[in-house]
Each structure stands twice: as structure tokens, then as C-alpha cells.
Amino acid sequence: MALARAFASVASLTRQGESKLGFAGKAFASTTTVNGVPVEVHNEGGSKRVVVTKTLPGERWLQFLINAGCRVEVSKHPDVILSNATIKQLMGTKCDGVIGQLTEDWGSELFEALKQAGGKAYSNYAVGYNNVKVDEATKRGIPVGNTPGVLTETTAELAAALTLAAARRVPEADVFMRSGKYKGWLPSLFVGQLLQNKTVGIIGAGRIGAAYARMMVEGHKMNLVYFDPYPNKQLEDYIRLYGELLRHRGEPPVAVKRVETVEEVLKEADVVSLHCNLDASTRHLINSQRLALMKPTAVLVNAARGPCIDEAALVAHLKANPEFRCGLDVFEDEPAMKPGLADCPNAVIVPHIASASLWTRSGMATLAAANVAGILSGYPVWNKQDILGFVDKPLAAAPHAAPSIVNAKELKLKMVAE
Ligand code: DGY
């Protein structure tokens, strides 16, 4: 009753559509509007109200929230990127938790609104959280979740796809073919770069960087040079063992080297892929001076965050060096591109799809929902590398924990024992 009153005061709840069968016959979705914003409602009778700012893939995520007694309202607002004003309308004056997007600006304004609405949990639907001012959430006692552990291979695969597409000029050749220009085989048609036995460089040897490195080293027998403030011993051991195997088979072995500076990677590698977080130290990490250090035939790949590259400098470099190529999944002023980039045939550009495999995107939804559900249920925080128990095990066997809370320590949240 109290909850119904709270909703009535927050929102003009207008039933707009008929219910449709929800999940495992347990819940029904209906549509309504909240302060003028269309939403899809699941588990209408739930006692905690969770707002989800975009439709998420899969069904498992919803079960986490429903099992935690949540009424879930998924925004159906037509804007691709929701403004703060719209998100505040969605939260209203009674909102226990939110699952938001990496395109949204989660800072003092939204966290204050969430706090005022009684909010106790926020999860980004992303592993990266440079769109979240975590200290603003911490100040207000709000745990912030993210979704690590399910993006690794999927993101690395896309970085590898960009590398191959750029090195072998696949999009250029595709456009040529579609425009009916192909008149017959020629020795000089779309000649690109062979990767086999060359050197791949990575900047950032965390989970995704290491997975990409393994794909390139194993797949193309490339040597690895990497920069990371911390050595990745597991990756180094793996490559050394692979080198031994090749030697044993009478093939040239591969080598791995960690270097002290970004510059050393840029000078030495034939392919450089960025796998660092975005912060003050990595903004414009790749600028015109550093681009000038790279080989004129090198490939630069970015599936991390757009502002890690000075994109205007990259456009100038691509224009001046037609044999230099890049593969970009992310952009400095996303969704916009810097002037001239789209006209560079030596740039392969895709719209931030590195994590876009169904398994990963559904897994991200599950982790984000489990973060919010876990906090609202008073569970401890998991924060361990292996999160597959949340994603792949039968739901009943999923850990009773919030999988990944980035400010758990600052908020002194209880952790699951090792
Ligand atoms: C993330 O999760 O940070 C990715 O950029 C989404 O693709």
C-alpha cells in the first residue's frame, strides 16, 4: 500500500498496453509511463523499485532482480542517449536501484537524485566506468557496480578482427567490390601487411590485453612487446611455453618482452593495440609525437576508450601516411568522429561493438542486475576474478553476492571470504 502511494506521488502511471508473457511464466511485462517516460514493467508487485535505462539482452538478469523482490522498470524512451533530465524523471521520488549505461553522465546530479529517491545501488552496464564519478556515489553511500569477466574474449576478438581488417584492407576491398569496380585479379589489388612472425605490441596487459596478445601470438606466431606498470607473469609464461613448443617443432620461437615505456612499444611493434583504462594519465596517450615514432606501415588498434588517442592527430597522421592503418571501435567524441576520419580509407571504423557478442552482452546484463539485486538483498560483495557462477551456472546455484562493486572498500562493504 505504501509502495503504491509512493508510486502515485512519483509518477503518472498510465497503463498503455496489454501484458505479455514474461519469464518462465513467473512475471508479466506491461507498459506504462513514469513522469511521461514510457517504461516496460516487470514484476509489478515487487517491493523495491529498480529502473533500467535501456532494454537489456537475455532473460536471466531479470530473474536476479525478480528473485530479490524488485519491480523492474525498463525505459522505452526513444532517445539513444538519455539526458540527465530524463533519467531523473525515470527515477522519480522512489527508486531503490538503477542499471545505467556507459553513455550516461553518472555524477553528482544523478547520484543526488538517486539518493533523494532512497536509492541504495547503481550498476553500470559496462566493465569501464569512466562515465561514473565514483566518489560522488561513495559520498552518498551508494555502491557502484560494473561487469568485469565477461568481456575479455569477446572484446579481444573484435580487437583482433580490427587488426586483420586494417592490415589486409578488408573494408576498402569490400566497398570496391560492392561498387562494381572489380574487373579482374591484379597483382597490386589491395596489397596489405602480413602479420605472421612480426611483432604485436600492447599497452595495458590486463585481462583483455592479455587475451588479445594470446590471439595474435598464437594465431600469427607474432612476438609480443608490452607496456604495463605491472608485469603479467601468466601471460609471459604462456608465451614462453608456446615459444618452446614452436622450437620443439623446429619452427622459429616467439618471444615476449615487457618494456619500460610506451615509446619502446610504438617504435618496435608492427601492430599496437590499446588496452588501458581511460584516466588522466591515458588521455591522449597516443598523440602526434608518439604517432611519429610508429613504423609508417604500422597498424594502431583501439577498442579501449576513444580519448586515449588524440583523434585529430590520428587523422593528420593517416592522411600523411597512407600505408599506416588503424582500427577503431571507440572515438574521442563518441558518437561523433573528428572531421576527416570517415574519409580516410586507411581507417577501419566500427561503432563501439567490441563487447557485442550475445553471450557477453547477456552476461553483462546478468552481472549488472546481480550487483543491484545483491546490494538490495544485503549480500556481501564478490569482487573475485571468476564470475561465471553468476552467469553460466543454474540460477539457484548462483552465489549470494554482488559480483563487482568498485567502491566496496571505500564503503566498507562486507566481502565474500576468499
Ligand atoms: C565496457 O563495458 O566498458 C565496454 O566498452 C562496452 O563495450
Image (cartoon, rainbow, N blue to C red):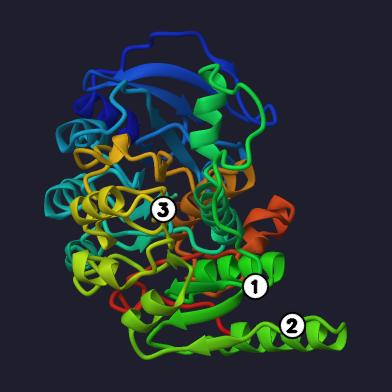
The label on residue 197 is 1
* Quarter containing the N terminus: top left
Q: Nearer the viewer, residue 385 or 305?
A: 305
Q: Report how far apart the C-alphas of labels 2 and 1 lie in the structure.
A: 8 Å
Question: Is the C-beta separation of discs 3 and 2 under 8 Å?
Answer: no
Q: Residue at x 21, y 34 (%)?
A: 92
Q: Nearer the viewer, residue 313 or 374?
A: 313
Which amino acid, mark 2?
Pro
Q: Residue at x 50, y 8 (%)?
A: 18
Q: Secondary structure at mark 1?
A: loop
Q: Secondary structure at mark 3?
A: strand
Q: Position of residue 366 (x, y in %)?
A: 55, 49
Q: Which residue is mark 3?
A: 325
Q: Position of residue 5 (x, y in %)?
A: 27, 29
Is 268 left or right of 385, judged from the image as shown?
A: left
Q: Position of residue 297 (x, y in %)?
A: 43, 61
Which of the marked residues, 3 or 1, is nearer the chain's N terminus? 1
Which amino acid, mark 1?
Asn
Q: Is residue 104 above or below residue 71?
A: below
Which of the marked residues, 2 or 1, is nearer the chain's N terminus? 1
Question: Is the C-beta separation of discs 2 and 1 under 8 Å?
Answer: yes
* Quarter containing the C terminus: bottom right
Q: Residue at x 47, y 78 (%)?
A: 415
Q: Quadrant of residue 306?
A: bottom left
Q: Is mark 2 within 8 Å of ligand 1?
A: no
Q: Residues within 10 Å of mark 3 (few under 14, many from 20)?
A: many
Which amino acid, mark 3?
Arg
